Amino acid sequence: MEKTVIEVQQGDITKVAVDAIVNAANNSLLGGGGVDGAIHRAGGPDILEECRQIRARQGGCPTGEAVITTAGRLPAKYVIHTVGPIWDGGQKGEPGLLASCYRNSLKLAQEHGVQSIAFPNISTGVYGYPKDKAAKVAVETVKSYLQEQATSIKQVVFVCFDEENYELYQRLLQG
Ligand code: AR6
């Protein structure tokens, strides 16, 4: 089987033309700041309306899980909203929850026939997860998922907004 390409880019995830972009959302699914704010601003009100419907059905999104909507005005077809853990010292299950975000997002993408997917650096903004630790979890989880599963996904892009994350991911993906 053809190998999935894993790439790193620096920039704004709302501009990336892939089948699905992942949003670092919160349990309410009702929007917020950071990448969540940027996605809803650029994508328009349809995304929030779909999030409201999901919320009415299932009461938001638990930490570590993911839900999918269309992408409004964005170049992507889908937005996968996942909720990262809030960093609280690292002994409260944060690494497992962060890994679940990546795994559940890939699973949902696969269920929708997605071939290319872009991730932001989940939890490393407002939620305070140390960037180096989060990058390791992200890269390890994506790599092991792709090794374990037969998948439709041909391209995974880590979109880093800041220089520090960009350098961390470049280093981790070199090897
Ligand atoms: N494109 C790509 N990455 C971005 C963008 C962008 N346009 N904007 C910010 N980032 P954060 P969290 C990076 O705070 O830590 C929201 O209010 C940013 O530099 O967006 O998971 C939600 O509603 C950082 O590396 O998400 C939640 O309440 C990364 O995205 C809460 O923040 C994640 O930072 C979630 O916190």
Image: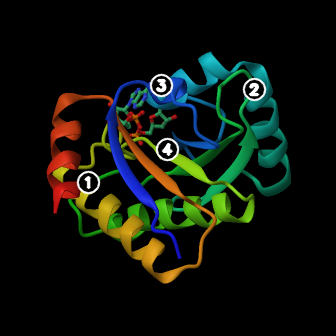
* Residue 111 vertical position relative to residue 73 in the rendered view, above or below: below
Q: Residue shown at 72%/21% (left/top)?
A: 73
Q: Earlier in the sequence, mark 3 or mark 1?
A: 3
Q: Helix, strand or loop at disc 3?
A: loop
Residue at disc 3, CB closer than 8 Å to ligand 1? yes
Query: Residue 33 has which mark?
Result: 3
Nearest to N terminus: mark 1 or mark 2: 2
Three-letter amino acid code at the position of disc 4? Ala
Which label sits on residue 118? 4
Residue 61 appears in view? no
Ranked by sequence position, the earlier of labels 1 and 4 is: 4
Query: Relative to 77, is 163 on the left or the right?
Result: left
Residue contact at pointers 2 and 4, CB within 8 angstroms: no
- At horizontal 81% and vertical 37% (from top left) the residue drawn is 50
Q: Return the residue at label 1.
A: 135
For residue 72, the mark is 2
Residue 62 sits in quarter: bottom right
